[in-house]
Amino acid sequence: MSSRDVAPSSPGAPAPGDEGATSSRGRRVLRRLEPALAISPFLVYSFLGLGIPTLAVVYYAFHGETGGWSTANIAIVWHGDQGIFRTGFENSIKLGLLSSIIPGILGVFIAYAIQTSKSPFLQRLTSTASGVLANFGGINLTFMFIATLGSTGILTAWLHAIGINLASIGFNLFTFSGVAVVYMYFQLPLMVLVITPALGGLRASWREAAENLGASSWSYWRHVGIPVLMPSILGGMLLLFGSAFAAYATAESLTLGLIALSPIQIGNFLNGNVIAGETHVGYAIAFGMLVILVVTMTLYSLVRKRASRWLR
Amino acid sequence: MAPLSSGSVFDVAQAEDEAVQPYSSGRPRRRVRWWRGVVLLLAGAYFLIPLYAGLKFSLQGVSGGFSFLAFQKLPSAPGFSAALTLSLKLAVATMVVSTLLMVPTAIYVHVRLPRLRRMMDVVTILPIVIPPIVLIVGVLGVFPEWAKASPYLLSFMYVILAMPFVYRSLDAGLGAIDLKTLTEASRSLGGNWLKTIWRVVLPNIRPALLSATVLTLALVFGEYTMASLDLWTTIPVWITQFQVSSDGHIQVAASMLGLVGTWILLVLVVSLDRSQSRRSRRRQGVS
């Protein structure tokens, strides 16, 4: 931290008693180096906390336990152990798609409903609540849903009273369907947060122009609204996919680590539930997740660039 | 909702709209009122029912009546105070390191290196792209034993996890003030850089600092993935593991307390933020 504090004080006003050719050259060098010095604590910290762990995952994914280059770990993930790791990836991707497409679409409707309500109170409430809920998850969320949709939950009881038995229609809070419903609780607010600025970019004059040309509400949305919003909606969904695909705490606490999802499987590896000779498979799963997430987020940033065209 | 959707009301509303302001702009037509009601009702139900269920469960006594007993028993529950102490220590360490690291960097980039802002955006978004579960695998794989033996390894990583929120908050705060004029004015009045940052810049970005701090606090008190895999019993880990005397009510009470506490803090920050920005805007208007 100290270099950070000292560096900015060197340029500009010369310090008193700081004269002579040598020290002025020293100052010039210092000034040249100042940006690097000033930004280096941040870069070093990021490298230690982000770069090294990521590189470690990639390195170990391709190295066997005895050292040396190897693709054995990747091979085990791909078709070893009766395919449980591959199933994990398939389930995670399915869960990611399910809890990005559905909340993605519903989120647009909610955001639009709130935006057109023209109620400042409602809008403020939504933006605050979305910010809080989008970062919500883990054990708190699990408990709330057990109290709601568990076997003695209040919604289960209400639905039972009107003749709907959740268990008999194949819903179980502690399996895939339950996880998907619970994930919506933070996915929907995330979508509302992401899509609201884009909705603000839909100008009233476009709608009026369309109406003056005789467009119905449907054809306005078909030819103007949806095409303009599409990049933002897709971008939001990609973000949601990444968030659901990578989530660990909620699925772990809800299913007690018994669901076959990639993040849970990594956790099991770290907790020591490892078959001898496969201790590095956890890194290979993490590497696989990393690849999928980097692709997702690259697509996101591309789509986002396209979307920003319509935003003022 | 049904009457609003019927044809006549809808036509009248629209006709009124057009009669008053034939070429109005920015005012939406009233035709979509009914579905808006349905959507908001359903969304409200989806978000409020679990909240209600959780609160109800935590306030339920053994006999089924209303009671605060679960909350009263919480402080003396085994392991609770140790977990709370650990979480508090980690929170303080994380907030201090995060502030010392991010505030000078963000200010410097804004004043001196605006062309690096894109790079900063990319680096600070990485903790969202690379999930905590992947990071902690790597950390536990390569970090030296002495680092892994200390709970502050978690604080080290929480600074990383908080980066996206902290940097974005500071970036927005710094973008909202005329930083260049302020720093130049302070420098020309003879203030050195340290003084400029301390007496001029920081007071002007107080709301951003505050919201960054609170977001960090919320993060530390909610983080489960890294803490549980690094085998430290922080509050979320304690809540998950606590099953003594199978008193689930205490568990849920702790969980709801955390939720409501975070909620209040964040709402406070948002409203503080708003009043602050309104005040600064007014001041700018006068001068």
Image (cartoon, coloured by chain):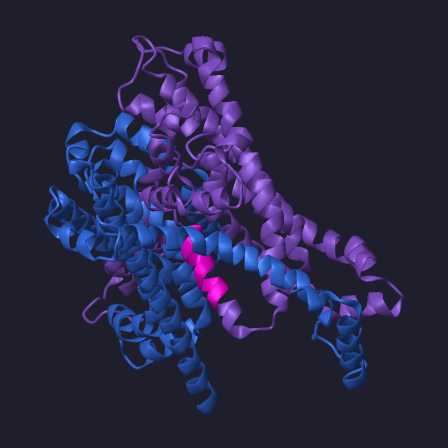
Chain colours: A purple, B blue
Expressed as whole percent of the image width and height from the top left, the position of residue A101 reads 60, 41
Q: Is residue B18 left or right of residue A27?
A: right
Q: Above or below — where is A229 with respect to A248?
A: below
x then y, percent, for residue A16: 20, 72
Q: Name, please, the residue furthest toward the right.
A: A214
In the image, A13 versus B148, the foreground residue is B148
Residue A43 horizontal/vertical position (percent): 35, 45
Q: Nearer the viewer, residue B82 or A17?
A: B82
| Residue A231: % across, % down | 66, 49
- Look at 45% across and 30% down and name the residue there: A175
Query: Does the magenta portion include A174?
Result: no
Q: Quadrant of the C terminus of chain B?
A: bottom left
Residue bounds of the magenta highlight: A125-134
Farthest-out residue, bottom: B286
Q: Is residue A1 visible?
A: no
Is residue B111 something that shows in the picture? yes
Which is the main secondary structure of the residues drawn in magenta? helix
Q: Residue at x 17, y 28 (%)?
A: B145
Number of numbered markers: 0
Residue A95 in the figure: left or right of residue B50? right
Q: Residue visible at 70% across and 69% down? A: B4
A241 displayed left or right of B223: right
Q: Is residue A241 above or below residue A74?
A: below
The residue under the point 20% across, 57% down is B68
